[in-house]
């Protein structure tokens, strides 16, 4: 009895190879994307320490803040049980977890960020187009 390829039970070997190569490309794309994001964060942290230090306090508070996850999940469950829109319920849950109502604009953008922003705006308003001055401003050399 001869084995025939292309039946429903077993696809031809060429199709199997195509499936595996497409899966490999997706994994490679995800790996390259993750590596690119890591590199971008690494370069941003090392080349612009003053700019990243401004947001360090905000990020620390966001990561270590006390969020009542039990209440957030209970509210999500109640809203879904009442037959509400699932996307809207998840959106409300995300707001409750990641941006509590008591957060104000002053907490999000600290005073140091306002000073840094005004300095950057002033530089670009007075910048005459000199590339060397721009490089010196964006990449200060600490001596």
Image: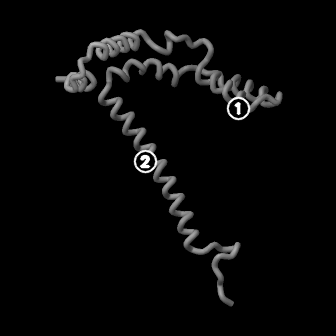
Label whose residue precedes the other's in the sequence (2 or 1): 2
Q: What coloring was used for the rendering?
A: one colour
Q: Answer whether labels 2 and 1 touch (C-beta < 8 Å).
A: no
Give the image quarter of residue 57: top left
Q: Is residue 84 left or right of residue 90?
A: right
Marks 2/1: CA distance? Answer: 30 Å
Q: Residue at x 52, y 11 (%)?
A: 105
Q: Residue at x 32, y 20 (%)?
A: 50
Residue 61, horizontal then vertical, whole percent: 50, 19
Query: What crowding class fits label 2: few (fewer than 14 Cα within 10 Å), some (14-19), or many (20 or more)?
Result: few
Q: Residue at x 66, y 74 (%)?
A: 10
| Residue situated in front as seen by the camera: 131 or 91 | 131
Above-or-below relation of 140 to 14: above
Q: Which mark is residue 32?
A: 2
Furthest toward the left, the residue is: 143
| Residue situated in front as seen by the camera: 122 or 44 | 122
Badge 1 is on which residue? 87
Q: Quadrant of the N terminus?
A: bottom right
| Residue situated in front as seen by the camera: 142 or 10 | 10
Q: Is residue 139 left or right of residue 82?
A: left
Furthest toward the front, the residue is: 128
Residue 121, horizontal then vertical, whole percent: 34, 14
Say what secondary structure mark 2 lies in. helix
């Amino acid at each position: 009895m001869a084995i025939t390829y292309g039946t429903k039970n077993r696809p031809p070997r060429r199709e199997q190879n195509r499936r595996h190569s497409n899966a490999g490309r997706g994994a490679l794309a995800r790996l390259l994307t993750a590596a690119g994001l890591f590199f971008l964060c690494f370069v941003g942290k090392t080349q612009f320490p003053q700019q990243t230090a401004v947001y360090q306090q905000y990020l620390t508070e966001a990561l270590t803040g006390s969020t009542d996850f039990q209440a957030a999940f209970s509210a999500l469950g109640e809203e879904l049980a009442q037959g509400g829109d699932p996307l809207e319920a998840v959106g409300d849950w995300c707001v409750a977890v990641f941006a509590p109502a008591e957060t104000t604009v002053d907490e999000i953008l600290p005073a140091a960020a306002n000073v840094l922003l005004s300095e950057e705006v002033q530089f670009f308003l007075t910048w005459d187009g000199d590339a060397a001055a721009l490089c010196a401003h964006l990449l200060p050399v600490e001596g």
